Amino acid sequence: DQNISMETISCTDCDSHQKFENEIVASLKAHPKHLLSKYFYDQKGDVLFQQIMNMPEYYLTDCEMEIFTKKTEEIAHAVKAFDAPFDLVELGAGDATKSSHLLKYLVTKNVDFTYMPIDISGNIISVLKERFSREIPDLDLVGLNGEYFEMLDKANSISSRRKVILFLGGNIGNMEVEEAHQFCHELRKKLNPGDILLIGFDLKKDPDIILSAYNDKAGITASFNLNLLERINNELDANFDIGKFKHYQTYDPLAGACRSYLISLEKQNVMIGNQVIHFSENEAVYMEISQKYAPEETDKMALQNGFKPVKHISDTKGWFIDAIWKV
Ligand code: AVI
């Protein structure tokens, strides 16, 4: 007789086709042209990202996985898990492979908490619930399907317990530094004294190691970028010829900015519905930033946005940190 709650709360307007179309067309009409990497993750994009995480060059997942498997107890203490009860809110939970180690540990220790995974994909939330009802039957779970901040408001409205927020995977790296500050500022406004944030940062390191992780020999990252053009073809009645674009990756070791582009191999016009987008030969479309930080830069980010940096939990190579910030 299991006594588990496993409900899901969904957003009203998170899968808006119109928003997708508006943002894509606007970003391709802008100067310079760009696309938003949040749109990489359709069904094929999800599979390609899984493949990226399994590539030998892509060290980020292994590093953070090592932290979650080998330093579970340290994490639990750092987020004051034994000061229960609390809600463990994961922003962009995905398949929760890393956090599941912490969840299992906390359930084994009989800690009184509710796991609240937030994800834009309703599908992934149902998959999670199905899996955890088998693997961690005593886990109390409330799925939140929607955008981070909207769902964080929901989490606050359904429970006034202390919040521990997980933001893993170096996802903050997919924001420009300015945007990342803005994000932390907004997040802080939704939290209360006593709340804790655990946030993953990929660190500045040997530039060759970083560049290889995003410029893999097998070309999976290239397919991952090009897949967004295919998605636009499929969903917005567009006619990109994928063979007429190539993926180009850079890393700037001073700025810590790893950026991907698609380069138009020739002068061409592309139709998106009834709109024409003109590309000149060698014109670049800016696709994604994967920003790398120095540990002290993450402390500054905390302080500038109303958090107190508490500690860095690192992998043995010292390539990645999960930073603990207190409100
Ligand atoms: C999801 N995010 C942290 C990945 C990264 O490393 O920036 C996305 C990615 N893009 C290319 N490879 C992986």
Image (tube, rainbow, N blue to C red):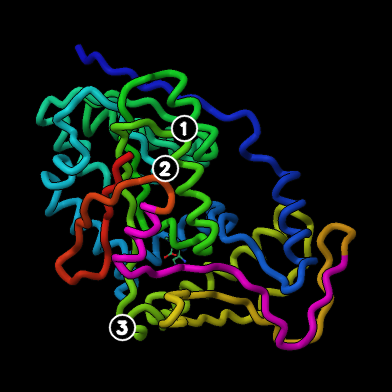
**In the displayed structure, does residue 268 sit left or right of residue 148?**
right
**In the displayed structure, does residue 91 sit left or right of residue 11?**
left
Query: In which quadrant of this rendering is ligand 1 seen?
Result: bottom left
How many numbered marks have been drawn onto this rendered protein structure?
A: 3
Residue matched to label 1:
152
The residue stretch that appears in magenta: 276-303
The answer to whether mark 2 is within 8 Å of ligand 1 is no
Label 1 amino acid?
Answer: Leu
Residue matched to label 3:
206
Residue matched to label 2:
91
In this rendered view, identify the residue nearer to me: 132 or 61: 61
Residue 97 at least partly seen:
no
C-alpha gap between disc 1 and disc 3: 36 Å
Q: Helix, strand or loop at disc 3?
A: loop
Residue 177 against residue 70 in the figure, above or below: below
Q: Residue at x 76, y 88 (%)?
A: 281
